[in-house]
Amino acid sequence: MASMEKRLQKELQALLRDPPLGVTVDSDKTSRSLSEWTVDLEGAPGTLYQGEKFQLAFKFGPRYPFESPQVIFTGSNIPVHPHVYSNGHICLSILTDDWSPALSVQSVCLSIVSMLSSCKEKKRPPDNSIYVKTCSKNPKNTKWWYHDDTV
Amino acid sequence: MASRVTSDSPNSDASGSASQDHEKEDSKNFECNICLDTARDAVVSMCGHLFCWPCLHQWLETRPTRQVCPVCKAGISKDKVIPLYGRGSTDQQDPREKLPPRPPGQRAEPENTGPFPGFGFGDGGFQMSFGIGAFPFTFFASTFNFGNDGRPAPPQAGSPQHADEQFLSQVFLFMAVFFIIWLMLA
């Protein structure tokens, strides 16, 4: 538990000190509890999401960083993307199977920005309506099937 | 859970002198890739990534069936990490804290750079070999070596030389089997 807080503290300080382009930690909401973060994302310039603003909610379990955080899009604007469901769940392998403790909030944010940036056509996943109706609240309980490396 | 964040202002270290910056940079190079702190009971993987041994051990335990380097996803295991012993750092620690124990270092003997070993009677040993059967069926061949014949000891298990030699011996074995099959079929 202590190691989780120590590491999150370090990550937060680094992100506040030196945030990557288009990634902003909402420090007011985050400092209330280190185990839940809100991060603002901006669509990268020159992509389909240019100028759009999104919000990510991170939830860290006591076994972080050995276990991945729960990451979903939240707020009013959920990006329309083939790997993002309309309830904010994200189909991204590093959030479950390919998680590694060397990843961080920053690298997850950059992966998500990059996933958005490589999108060619804005559309929801084909199984969006049925998934949103039947899924668990926690996307980590979903058995994701990673099949598309292009977007 | 509800701990406060001590957010230092972005400009707080702008006043630090150049040497302090340099020191900071230096210690950053020795941060564990998992806890982001200066590595404690440091180990380094074959792929060159630095971790605290307790951190890496916990990660290896988390996914025992798929042990990969957290940084580069190279295959990794307990036997394939090297402990780092800094000067004076080993005896300062309470050994009880070293749970799980850090894997020991591997010591390979230094390479022998003398005259070409394995030939000649003069240099400190006598070698003899004999076999029964016609070439290539020398299944019962054996080799006797008396005394120290000047050849270096085989490398320790787990070292790169050992892996190389294992590979080479497998290649030769494969060639021998192939040759015998070829003789039988021909």
Image (cartoon, coloured by chain):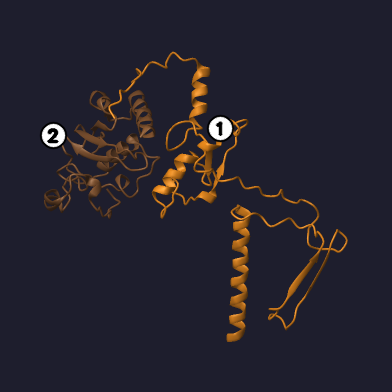
Chain colours: A brown, B orange
Q: Residue B178 versus residue A5: which sits nearer the camera?
A: A5
**Residue flagged by tag 2: what amino acid is it?**
Ser
Q: Secondary structure at mark 2?
A: loop
Alpha carbons under labels 2 and 1: distance apart:
52 Å
Which residue: 59% across, 54% down? Answer: B158
Tag 1's secondary structure?
loop
Residue under circle 1? B93
In the image, are marks 2 and 1 on the same chain? no
User: Is any part of residue B186 visible from this angle?
Assistant: no
Please say whether residue B181 is visible from this viewpoint. Answer: yes
* Amino acid at pointer 1: Gln
Chain of the residue under the numbered disc 1 shown in the image: B
Q: In the image, residue A129 lies at what x, y percent?
A: 11, 50
In which image quadrant can residue A117 be found? top left
* Residue that extends furthest to the front in the rendered view of this protein: B96
Image point (18%, 44%), residue name = A137
Residue B135 in percent (x, y) is at 71, 81
Residue A76: numbered disc:
2
- The 10 Å Cα crowd at callout 1, few under 14, some 14 to 19, many 20 or more, is few
The image shows residue B155 at horizontal and vertical percentages of 66, 55
Res B177 label: none
